[in-house]
Image (tube, rainbow, N blue to C red):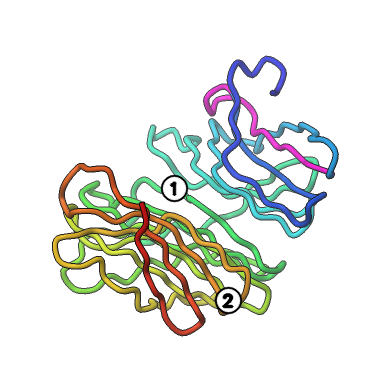
Amino acid sequence: MPKGSGFASLAGVSCLTARSCVAVGDSQGGSGPVTMETWNGAKWTLRTARIPGAGPENPGAVSCLSVTSCVVVGESYSSGRGAPAMLLARWNGKSLAAMKAAAPAGAGDIILNDVSCASASLCVAAGSSTNTAGTHQFGFAELWNGTSWTARAVAMPKGDTDSLLYGVSCRAGGRCIAVGSAGTATAAKAIALSSNGKTLTAQNVPGPGKGKSSDFAAVSCPKADECVAIGDIGPAGKVVTATLLSGRWNGSSWRLAAAQ
């Protein structure tokens, strides 16, 4: 725990090998420095950092190509509006530096939920935002080409009013899969999108069935043609204990399975 932090938590981790990991979190409930923990196979080493010129930062995820090359994402309250904005920064092993994010058109409150980097020229961050009126949510992705970030909003089917992106996984070779949900305030469907670092393409995910809602909260792709997503499924428009939902991508289609 950082000295004098009072309270600290870790929210995300990225491991290159069993002996090389970087974890990220916050301290003092987000008002303190960002917490960076590195693992060498035997022990954790604590570092703290602040983004120059930034205010309270709440990192939620990290993706590393090495222990000295990581991208950190989350939410920031440094705008002074009292509403969250994107936290997007680069870690060089010693310090954090803000990266220039591309805000999606029509965005209000913005949060980046996850990030995955396949190479120095391919990273995708999964995010969520409200519209400027605060009446609806829409998911978007931040795409990194090695030079700059570009924002791509989730294209929603006709009739859908809300979308969210929660998780993303990229593999070497140039393919990333982002997951979340889309629908209305009372009924949603799990979604998955493919990205080559330039565009977002919707994949066909089976619906949850009549009167039900589903979502994907996280995804991991050990191979380019093999991904596993997890989320939940339950009655639409009702506050109940949801059932665990898993999805498997085989390179051409998604298959869903519910389990207790």
Please state the horizontal and vertical placement of residue 3, each as a whole percent of the image.
72, 18
| Looking at the image, residue 129 lies above or below residue 95 | below
Quadrant placement of the N terminus: top right
Residue at image coords 75%, 48%: 21
Q: Which residue is mark 2?
A: 175
Please state the horizontal and vertical placement of residue 149, each as a whole percent of the image.
56, 64
Please state the horizontal and vertical placement of residue 160, each as a whole percent of the image.
20, 65
Number of marks present in the image shown: 2
Amino acid type indicated by mark 1:
Ile
- Give the side of residue 230 with respect to residue 207, left or right: right
Q: Which residue is mark 1?
A: 111
- Give the side of residue 252 with respect to residue 205, left or right: right
Q: Nearer the viewer, residue 151 or 193?
A: 193
Q: Nearer the viewer, residue 17 or 12?
A: 17
Q: Quadrant of residue 47?
A: top right
- Give the side of residue 160 with respect to residue 215, left or right: left
Q: Residues within 10 Å of mark 1 (few under 14, many from 20)?
A: many
Q: Magenta stretch? A: 28-40
Q: Residues within 10 Å of mark 2 (few under 14, many from 20)?
A: many
Amino acid type indicated by mark 2:
Arg
| Looking at the image, residue 4 lies above or below residue 88 | above
Q: Nearer the viewer, residue 211 or 15?
A: 211
Residue at image coords 58%, 30%: 9
Q: Is residue 77 magenta?
A: no
